[in-house]
Image: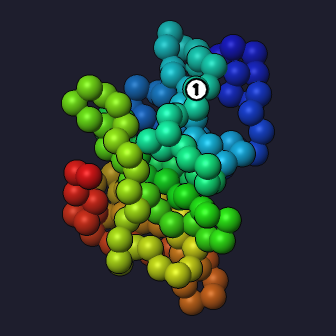
């Protein structure tokens, strides 16, 4: 890894590693990817505006094949979970909020998909404390 490449950015929130070793992480309200090649990580690249907005994005999860990205986006009040898929050209589509059954008036963050792809796990503050919740991953579709 180049000296300090991943650690040059501060305040890292949850990371996710694709099958090819590329690492996705958030720093100071933006989501980045650092490509892994020949045993080294490249300088992190901030994802484009399909993912990063003027709001605050954090806690990314990327599918092993890098075709789906789920993350939390906060408007300063509370985070909700958003999803993006890659288009045929390999670009991330504009992220959309996950709907009813996932996002509530409470905080939702830290998404993870089970290894078999059947369940979406996430943290939510519904009930007053952060707890783990899960739903059938079929709700994710191919937005």
Q: Residue furthest top?
A: 38
Where 46 falls versus 39 (above or below)? below
Q: Position of residue 86 (x, y in %)?
A: 31, 37
Q: Position of residue 38 (x, y in %)?
A: 50, 9
Residue sitting nearer the eye, 46 or 39: 46
Residue sitting nearer the eye, 49 or 85: 49
Q: Position of residue 1 (x, y in %)?
A: 65, 16
What residue did someone put label 1 on? 45
Q: Quadrant of residue 91?
A: top left
- Relative to residue 143, is residue 100 drawn left or right? right
How crowded pointer 1 is (Cα within 10 Å; few <14, some 14-19, many 20+) is rated as few
Where 140 falls versus 63 (above or below)? below
Q: Position of residue 23 (x, y in %)?
A: 53, 33
- Relative to residue 76, is residue 98 drawn left or right? left
Q: Residue at x 66, y 71 (%)?
A: 77
- Count of numbered circles in the view: 1
Q: Residue at x 61, y 54 (%)?
A: 55
- Relative to residue 139, is residue 35 drawn left or right? right
Q: Residue at x 56, y 80 (%)?
A: 106
Where 69 falls versus 77 (above or below)? above
Q: Residue at x 22, y 63 (%)?
A: 138
Residue sitting nearer the eye, 10 or 84: 84
Q: Quadrant of residue 12?
A: top right
The answer to whether any part of residue 116 appears in the image is no
SS class of the residue under badge 1? strand
């Amino acid at each position: 890894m180049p000296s300090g490449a991943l650690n040059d950015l501060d305040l890292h929130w949850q990371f996710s590693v694709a099958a090819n070793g590329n690492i996705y992480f958030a720093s100071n309200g933006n989501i980045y990817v650092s490509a892994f090649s020949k045993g080294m990580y490249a300088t992190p690249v901030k994802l484009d505006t399909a993912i990063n907005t003027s709001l605050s994005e954090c806690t990314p999860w990327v599918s092993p094949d890098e075709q789906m990205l789920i993350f939390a986006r906060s408007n300063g009040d509370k985070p909700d979970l958003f999803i993006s898929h890659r288009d045929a050209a390999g670009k991330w589509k504009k992220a959309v909020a996950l709907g009813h059954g996932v996002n509530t008036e409470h905080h939702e963050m830290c998404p993870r998909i089970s290894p078999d792809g059947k369940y979406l796990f996430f943290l939510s503050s519904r009930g007053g404390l952060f707890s783990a919740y899960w739903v059938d991953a079929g709700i994710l579709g191919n937005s």
